[in-house]
Image (tube, grey):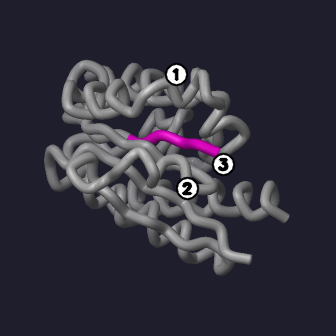
């Protein structure tokens, strides 16, 4: 049984795309999971509903981008319909500095997923968290470091593992 994990992101900037690709590699490393990598320019409401799990990413613009916020708002009342309830979800973001609002961006993404009844997945503990501060999801600041990609892959793998267990 293969689970489908949607990696959905606002493509404003190459850093967010680098994290999204690393997350997709982590998902695929699970073996029983398939990553579907889509930008907000490509994704449809049906992609959200059909996926078994979701990783949602936005560059930090003092919170989520207006583009992603509008896209999410246009998806209808998924929270009321229960379309995403019980599915694993996680967040990722990029920014220019650790204290430039990246935590707020992650929390806004998580807030939307919680409103939809999703099960939020965080990062497993690593020493990198002392530097990145990415307790709520994968982040990269001031460019993408190799350690940021490792965290992104770990988050993708963790979401995929939970999705497989929930489907099992």
Is 115 located above or below residue 7 in the figure?
Answer: above
Is 22 located above or below residue 32 in the figure?
Answer: above
Q: Which residue is mark 1?
A: 111
Mark 1 or mark 2, which is nearer the start of the sequence?
2
Q: Which residue is mark 3?
A: 124
The residues colored magenta run 88-92
Is residue 162 visible to us here? Answer: yes
In percent of the image, x 32 and y 29: which residue is there?
A: 74
Mark 3 to mark 1: distance in Å?
Answer: 20 Å
Magenta portion: prevailing SS class: strand
Q: Do tag 3 and tag 2 residues touch (Cβ < 8 Å)?
A: no
Mark 1 or mark 3, which is nearer the start of the sequence?
1
User: Residue 52's spot in the image, x, y percent?
Assistant: 63, 56
Q: Nearer the viewer, residue 157 or 148?
A: 157
Residue 10 appears left or right of 48: left
Which mark identifies residue 50?
Answer: 2
Name the image quarter holding the N terminus.
bottom right
Q: Nearer the viewer, residue 143 or 156?
A: 156
């Amino acid at each position: 049984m293969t689970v489908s994990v949607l990696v959905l992101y606002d493509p404003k900037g190459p850093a967010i795309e680098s994290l999204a690709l690393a997350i997709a590699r982590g998902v695929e490393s699970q073996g029983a999971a398939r990553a579907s990598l889509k930008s907000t320019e490509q994704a449809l409401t049906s992609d959200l509903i059909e996926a078994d799990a979701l990783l949602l990413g936005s560059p930090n613009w003092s919170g989520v981008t207006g583009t992603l916020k509008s896209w999410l708002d246009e998806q209808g009342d998924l929270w009321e319909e229960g379309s995403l309830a019980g599915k694993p979800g996680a967040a990722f973001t990029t920014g220019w500095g650790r204290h430039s609002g990246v935590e707020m961006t992650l929390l806004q993404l998580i807030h939307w997923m919680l409103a939809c009844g999703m099960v939020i997945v965080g990062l497993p503990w690593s020493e990198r968290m002392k530097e990145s501060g990415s307790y709520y999801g994968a982040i990269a600041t001031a460019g993408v470091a190799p350690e940021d990609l490792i965290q992104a892959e770990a988050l993708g793998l963790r979401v995929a593992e939970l999705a497989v267990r929930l489907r099992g």
